[in-house]
Amino acid sequence: MARRGKRYNQMAATFDKYLSYPPPEAIRMVRAMAAARFDETVEAVMKLGIDPRRADQLVRGTVVLPHGTGRSVRVAVFAGGDKQLEAEEAGAEVVGGQDLVDMLSSGGEIAFDVAIATPDMMPRVGRLGRLLGPRGLMPNPKAGTITRDVAKTVREFKGGKIEYRNDRYGNIAAPIGKVSFDDAMLYENLSALVGEIVRVKPPAAKGTYLRNLSLSSTMGPGVKVDASRLDRLVRR
């Protein structure tokens, strides 16, 4: 286990780490404990009652956060012809077709956070699986990143749309904003995220689905949240 700094331990000692706090209180606590010299990201982590080894229990998709994440999102688009111009006009930072595939294959810099591709480009982009897959950048239909409407998709991701997916332990971690956001903004983003995760509960998942929810800032300790008290949560 990694050693924690003195300040981290001091902050962790100011609250009960076993208690689940009402969402507004948890948000205030996380913001109050953020003391880094940069605008820390606030992240939500959910433990789900799924078996990540089973394909019919995987949880993956996208959700639009009402107030975005507070960070600039760099978008790459794999497309050809007029779709390249559409992507550029929508604000994509990296645009290309076979030339972009070749550049990345030869060791070029991956200077983007989201990758979008038109369906006709996927046979070529698929060759980058070993490069983009481990970074979570491979275009995928479940994430809405394989599309003909590249302009709309670029604008959505730059405007606050995020992708979520469970890890091999059944956890989902996603940003819900910055500590510079006010409490209401973080609350609305958290409600949107959790509501979406509950909405897409796999039918094959049995027992308690949303087992644990916590919030933390980049450098701060995690605070447990009572998710049942989120206004927009659809209970199951």
Image (cartoon, grey):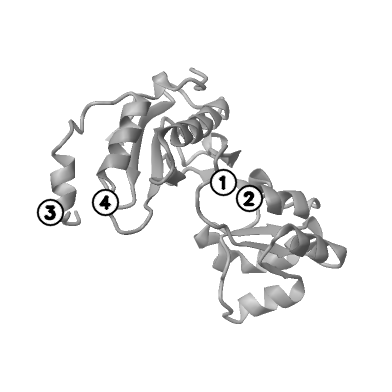
The residue that label 1 is drawn on is: 162
Residue 116 pos. (x, y %) = 69, 57
Mark 2, Cα crowd under 10 Å, few <14 / some 14-19 / many 20+, is many
**Which amino acid does the dot numbered 1 rest on?**
Ile
159, 50: nearer the viewer: 159
The residue that label 2 is drawn on is: 157
Mark 4, Cα crowd under 10 Å, few <14 / some 14-19 / many 20+, is some
Whether residues under marks 1 and 2 lie with C-beta atoms below 8 angstroms apart, the answer is yes
Mark 1, Cα crowd under 10 Å, few <14 / some 14-19 / many 20+, is many
Which residue sits at x=20%, y=56%?
A: 2
Which residue sits at x=32%, y=41%?
A: 31
The residue that label 4 is drawn on is: 35
| Marks 3 and 1, the one that precedes in the sequence | 3
Where is 40 relative to 227, above or below? Answer: below
Where is 141 relative to 202, above or below? Answer: below
Q: Secondary structure at mark 2?
A: helix
Whether residues under marks 4 and 2 lie with C-beta atoms below 8 angstroms apart, the answer is no
How far is disc 1 from disc 2 in space, using C-alphas? 6 Å
The extreme right residue here reads 82
Identify the disc placed on residue 6. 3
Q: Secondary structure at mark 1?
A: strand
